[in-house]
Image: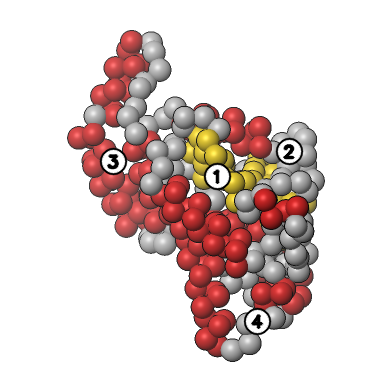
Amino acid sequence: MTGTDRTDADQTMPLVDLFPHSDQIAVLRMQSPPVNAWTDPFVEAMEAALTELESSAARAVVITGTGRHFSAGGDFHRFQQITDETTAREFVERVQGLMDRVAALPMPVIAAVNGTALGGGCELALACDVRVAGARAKLGQPEVRWGILAGAGGTQRLARLVGPGMSKLMMFTARPVDAAEALRIGLVEAVSDGYDPLPLALELAETMAVNSPRAIRSVKQCVDRGLDVDLPAGLELERELWIDLIPDGDLQEGAAAFFDGRDPRYPD
């Protein structure tokens, strides 16, 4: 979390750049110097980008930052304006809603954590389906140092990912973990050889994009919703979503491609 101001030169650059890497893969790049802090204009730009992605035909999305920062989280200038319960509720509901929208995107979402991901930046990575870290990445939830707690899903998604003990250790101490430690505890799924994780994230996105989008959406629902129910309910969800896929014909296309020795061709 930090306080930050944009220079005049920065004003010409969009706070969030959403662009196609290919016909099937979109890249969302945060570029609000110096640290991609969560100011009101930045949140508005993120919300607009998510609105576009929600109706997009992209089969995978990669979210990354610029320079040495993925996102250093909340902006202290903004925090100074939160002085009562009403403004606090408005703020936390908005940022929680934004992270929920990231998590609810129908396609795989990969966080390419290119550097510092603290507070809201870490929570954004947690809301993604898969996290790839650059060699110099640092991730953490330091909110208790500043008299607050992680309010954009951090206390819930971090515990589900690394377990309650490790998540409490990270949040109680306010200390970030480096890329190697993040990989060890399961906070990220891969670490790139260099500082920039974007090439590896795009490689993973390309591997995902050739598969059935309908089946991937169903897998995402099974895993995400299954975490909140007991095993019998999760198995019931899996069974029903499996059955629901059959009329779409993707299984028949997949089987035909297997016997023909070709790549399957799935519609969006």
Question: Mark 4 vs mark 1: which is more N-terminal?
Answer: 1
The residue shown at (73%, 42%) is: 134
Q: Secondary structure at mark 1?
A: strand
Q: Residue 53 got which mark?
A: none
Question: Mark 2 vs mark 1: which is more N-terminal?
Answer: 1
Q: Tell me the crowding category of disc 1: few under 14, some 14 to 19, or many 20 or more residues within 10 angstroms, Cα based.
A: many
The percent coordinates of residue 132 (x first, y second) are 65, 42
Question: Mark 4 vs mark 3: which is more N-terminal?
Answer: 4
Q: CA distance from mark 3 to mark 1?
A: 33 Å
Q: Residue 242 got which mark?
A: 3
The residue shown at (46%, 58%) is: 101
Which of 237 and 248 lies nearest the eye of the viewer?
Answer: 248
Q: Are marks 2 and 1 in contact (CB under 8 Å)?
A: no
Is 105 placed above or below 160 here? above
- Identify residue type, mark 3: Trp
Q: Which residue is mark 1?
A: 18
Q: Residue 196 got which mark?
A: 2
Q: Are marks 4 and 3 in contact (CB under 8 Å)?
A: no
Answer yes or no: is residue 247 visible: yes
